[in-house]
Image (cartoon, helix red, strand yellow):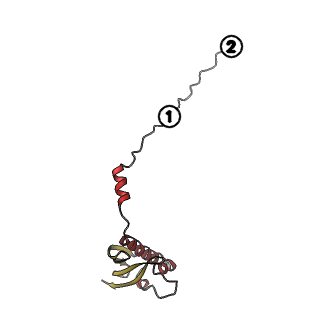
Amino acid sequence: MLTPAPVVATPRLVPPRVVPTPSPTPVATAIARATPVTFGGIAQGTVRRYLDDLIAGNEAGAYAALGKSPGEGGLSEEAFIDRGTRIVSIRTTSTDPTGATVEVRLSSGRGAYYATYHVLNGPSGPVIDQHDYIRE
């Protein structure tokens, strides 16, 4: 006599639930694309990269932002910039289509400083051609 085989339940596969992600609205996309890139924004980015390089100890990168080779001139901000230095505020004023002044308040382990950078659009791109700082 044959005994029937036991019935084994097989798990029912449920397809994963797909939740559509809304795409950006055409208006938001148009506004984002319509925002012009100004030299003031480029100058501010140049100064931020310069300061980030100094904070990280990347002298070659900092010299590049000045349009100089390492050892050519000096990185005067190294007198107070350390790894804990933070940008407190930054303000940019365009002087003309190829120049801008960037004013920065910095906080470091050695105190608070106010720095001014003049950025020009040189033949190889934006460079900091003048910079100075004072302790607040």
Disc 1 target residue: 15
Residue 105 vs residue 97, the one in the foreground: 97
Q: Position of residue 13 (x, y in %)?
A: 53, 31
- As displayed, is residue 33 above or below residue 111? above
Quadrant of the snapshot with the C terminus:
bottom left
What residue is rendered at 33% in x and 84% in y?
135
Residue 65 vs residue 98, the one in the foreground: 98
Residue 84 can be seen in this image: no
Q: Position of residue 121 (x, y in %)?
A: 42, 77
- As displayed, is residue 90 above or below residue 75? above
Q: Secondary structure at mark 1?
A: loop
Q: Secondary structure at mark 2?
A: loop
Near mark 1 (Cα within 10 A), the count class, few <14, some 14-19 or many ≥20, is few
Near mark 2 (Cα within 10 A), the count class, few <14, some 14-19 or many ≥20, is few
What residue is rendered at 35% in x and 84% in y?
133
Side of 135 relative to 17 (left or right): left
Disc 2 target residue: 2
The residue type indicated by label 2 comes to Leu
Quadrant of the snapshot with the N terminus:
top right
Q: Position of residue 99 (x, y in %)?
A: 37, 78
Q: Position of residue 41 (x, y in %)?
A: 37, 70
Residue 27 can be seen in this image: yes
Residue 115 vs residue 45, the one in the foreground: 45
Q: Tell me if label 1 and label 2 are in contact, CB under 8 Å.
A: no
Q: Label 1 to label 2, Cα distance in Å?
A: 38 Å
Q: Residue furthest bottom?
A: 73
Closer to the N terminus: mark 1 or mark 2? 2
The residue type indicated by label 1 comes to Pro
